[in-house]
């Protein structure tokens, strides 16, 4: 029989590596989204992802005899709404932009986290965190420079950029909400509300515009569900033990993973400017991770 408690102990023992694994699995999720034909709507992809994640999470909750409704239901629902908006925006950006670029824009969210965490949950922003965020933000600006985009023959519509940034803002708010909930709610209850809210809100839109996926698309869709569930689990556990602004810088690693998948699977061009920007982003991650190692 599956021993959830033993599995949880092993995951928790990973400590600072939880967020690294979260970044890796989320990057695999973006790879799956990019491989699915555009005839399947974004809403349908998010719905499938939510359904698979909900089934897995409810199975674990049932095994552990956890109250599935939680304590702070309003905040749990808000977390679900923010997560749903973020995921729709992220999926849209992945489809309409190079994978490496869409991942970079998504990772402007630590800037917003620093603001929201200070305002909403009164977290102290240390000098090291500010330094790491500034370095990462400079790297992102280098990558998104218009001349840089022209050099790699990339044209991106303004709507796609705006939607990608909206996804980053919603992601930041979702992170802060998860951090707030983690002090009172079970990890799996927090995870459960995300797909639950997504499924309920998106079901009417998907039914009206239903498109039956073929077998190839179904494989990628299942991959979205599995990798997102793994990423969400490691992310929630990681956020439980770290300040939201500090934890976010570790997840910059998804920029590196996304860039690798873009090169290997979609022939995306990576030049010296992109490497410089990515290196600055990675440096910010290393600074943050080194601080965590010293503290733990």
Image (cartoon, rainbow, N blue to C red):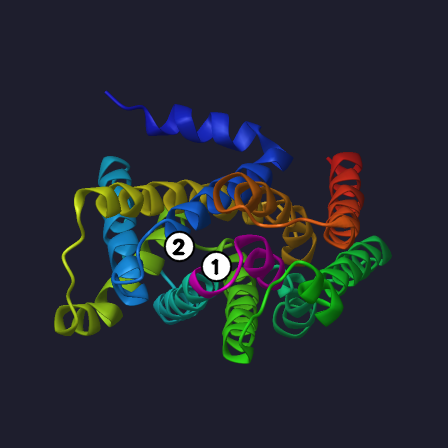
Q: Judge whether residue 222 can be spotted in this image.
A: yes
The residue lying at 24 percent from left, 54 percent from top is 48
Of the 4 image quadrants, the one containing the C terminus is: top right
Q: CA distance from mark 2 to mark 1?
A: 7 Å
User: In this picture, which residue range is highlighted in magenta?
Assistant: 94-106
Q: Secondary structure at mark 1?
A: helix
Indicate left or right for 224 with 211 as reference: right
**Residue occupying image coordinates x 36% and y 47%:** 188
Q: Quadrant of residue 92?
A: bottom left
State whether residue 237 appears in this view: no
Q: Would you name the residue on which mark 2 appears?
A: 190
Judge whether 130 appears above or below 15 on screen: below
Query: Which residue ends up furthest to the top in the rendered image?
Result: 1
Which is nearer the N-term, disc 2 or disc 1?
1
Q: Is residue 293 above or below residue 69?
A: above
Report whether 129 appears left or right of 47.
right
**Residue 16 x %, y %:** 64, 36
CB-based contact (under 8 Å), mark 2 and mark 1? yes
Q: Which residue is mark 1?
A: 181
């Amino acid at each position: 029989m599956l021993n959830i408690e033993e599995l949880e102990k092993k995951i928790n023992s990973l400590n600072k590596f939880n967020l690294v694994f979260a970044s890796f699995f989320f990057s695999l999720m973006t790879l799956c989204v990019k491989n699915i034909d555009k005839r399947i709507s974004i809403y349908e992809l998010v719905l499938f992802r939510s359904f698979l994640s909900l089934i897995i999470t409810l199975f674990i909750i049932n095994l552990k005899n956890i109250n599935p409704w939680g304590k702070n239901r309003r905040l749990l629902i808000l977390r679900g709404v923010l997560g749903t908006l973020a995921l729709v925006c992220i999926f849209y950006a992945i489809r309409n932009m190079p994978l490496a670029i869409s991942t970079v824009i998504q990772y402007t969210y630590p800037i917003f986290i620093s603001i929201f965490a200070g305002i909403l949950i009164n977290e102290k922003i240390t000098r090291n965190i500010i330094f790491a965020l500034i370095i990462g933000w400079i790297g992102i600006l280098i990558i998104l420079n218009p001349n840089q985009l022209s050099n790699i023959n990339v044209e991106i519509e303004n709507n796609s950029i705006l939607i990608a940034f909206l996804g980053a803002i919603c992601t930041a708010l979702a992170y802060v909400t998860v951090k707030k909930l983690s002090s009172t709610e079970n990890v799996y209850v927090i995870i459960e509300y995300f797909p639950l809210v997504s499924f309920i809100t998106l079901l009417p839109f998907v039914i009206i515009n239903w498109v039956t996926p073929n077998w190839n698309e179904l494989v990628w869709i299942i991959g979205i569900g599995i990798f997102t569930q793994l990423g969400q689990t490691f992310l929630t556990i990681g956020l439980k033990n770290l300040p939201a602004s500090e934890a976010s810088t570790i997840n910059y690693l998804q920029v590196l993973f996304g860039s690798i998948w873009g090169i290997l699977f979609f022939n995306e061009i990576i030049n010296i400017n992109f490497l410089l920007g990515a290196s600055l982003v990675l440096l910010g991650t290393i600074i943050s991770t080194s601080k965590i190692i010293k503290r733990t």
